[in-house]
């Protein structure tokens, strides 16, 4: 579901009339002149507000102005308002403010305004029901997105303080994925897809070579970091010339065969062609990794 197409910024020159107070940090309003329905978000914007009151467009507390043009998006947002606790909306807005402050930008992926509170609401339900939260991507998230993970820890503290509940590290990992989605303007589904592809590639390397790379080792961090940047180059359509690619194909034949298998796997998953230059870089990394584990035997 892509909600971002239904959201756009709105500029109003006349006062807003409050129709509904959503939380301490969000209100639903209409423009006095246009009558367009909007959502206004900002710290303390809904505190003490009441239906029928007016808000000036110049109010310095307003951080975001949104309208839902798509009827389907409107429906999903109304469902969100009915299902999500106002305290969850408040803590979500506080976390979004943290993200903007930490990364120095207000241009976030607007899906976060729906995706994050929905996720937090469900996570709280699982935690209150004493259900285990399993995160199969925890090692990869910590290694690949350390800045987002550190901020997610602060976000988990806000949730813990607001709801008097302990937030496990596995949930911190999921919050970090939402933060990455917000900052990088990548859908959460694509983040999961790429992270899973990195895991699959590591498993392919281990099964083909018979080695096991400890998940808490520097070797694992180097490996998945290389794979991450390789996938990003492929998705961006960038080619990094490798002057050693032809020579590596002739001299490191076993590593090259494995690199080819990895390239085929990536091509099948992403529907993209992996150029020889990129295969050469995979060969170089495989050689260094395998040399390291040969010395340990």
Image (cartoon, helix red, strand yellow):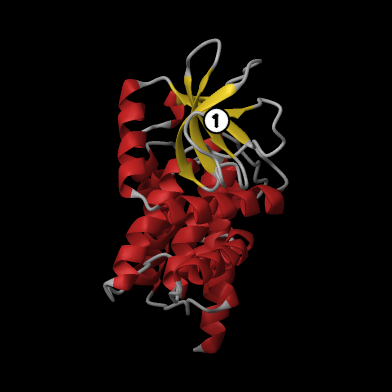
Question: To which residue does mark 1 refer?
Answer: 53
Residue lying furthest bottom: 297
The one nearer the camera, 64 or 37, is 37
Residue 174: percent from left, percent from top:
44, 61
132 vs 98: above or below: below
Q: At 54% from the left edge and 45% from the top edge, which residue is drawn?
A: 182
The one nearer the camera, 55 or 178, is 55
Q: How many marks?
A: 1
The one nearer the camera, 102 or 239, is 102
Q: At 64% from the left edge and 42% from the top edge, which residue is drawn?
A: 240
Mark 1 is surrounded, within 10 Å at the Cα level, by few (under 14), some (14 to 19) or many (20 or more) other residues, namely few
94 vs 290: above or below: above
Residue 206: percent from left, percent from top:
39, 71
Residue 137: percent from left, percent from top:
42, 64
> Is residue 44 in sight in this rendering?
yes
> Which part of the image, by quadrant, shows the N terminus?
top left
Which quadrant would residue 70 be assigned to in this image? top left
> Is residue 249 in sight in this rendering?
no
Q: At 38% from the left edge and 45% from the top edge, which residue is drawn?
A: 189
72 vs 293: above or below: above
């Amino acid at each position: 579901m892509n909600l971002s197409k239904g959201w756009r910024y709105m500029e109003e020159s006349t006062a807003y009339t409050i129709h509904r107070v959503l939380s301490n940090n969000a209100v639903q309003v209409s423009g006095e002149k246009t009558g367009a329905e909007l959502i206004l978000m900002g710290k303390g914007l809904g505190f003490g507000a009441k239906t029928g009151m007016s808000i000036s467009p110049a109010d310095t507390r307003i951080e975001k102005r949104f309208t839902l043009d798509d009827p389907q998006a409107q429906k999903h947002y109304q469902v969100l308002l009915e299902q999500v606790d106002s305290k969850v909306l408040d803590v979500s807005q506080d976390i979004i403010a943290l993200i903007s402050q930490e990364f120095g930008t207000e241009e976030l992926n607007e899906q976060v305004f729906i995706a994050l509170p929905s996720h937090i609401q469900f996570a709280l339900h699982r935690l209150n029901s004493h259900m285990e939260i399993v995160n199969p991507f925890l090692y990869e998230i910590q290694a690949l997105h350390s800045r987002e993970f550190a901020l997610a820890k602060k976000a988990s503290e806000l949730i813990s303080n607001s709801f008097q509940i302990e937030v496990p590290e596995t949930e911190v990992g999921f919050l970090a994925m939402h933060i990455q989605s917000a900052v990088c303007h990548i859908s959460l589904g694509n983040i999961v897809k790429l992270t899973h592809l990195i895991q699959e590639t590591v498993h392919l390397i281990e099964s083909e070579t018979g080695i096991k790379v400890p998940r808490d080792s520097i070797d694992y961090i180097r490996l998945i970091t290389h794979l991450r940047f390789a996938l990003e180059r492929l998705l961006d359509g960038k080619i990094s010339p490798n002057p050693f690619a032809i020579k590596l194909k002739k001299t490191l034949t076993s590593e090259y065969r494995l690199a080819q298998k990895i390239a085929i796997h990536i091509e099948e998953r992403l529907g993209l062609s992996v150029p020889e230059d990129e295969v050469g870089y995979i060969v170089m990394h495989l050689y260094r990794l395998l040399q390291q584990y040969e010395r340990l035997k």
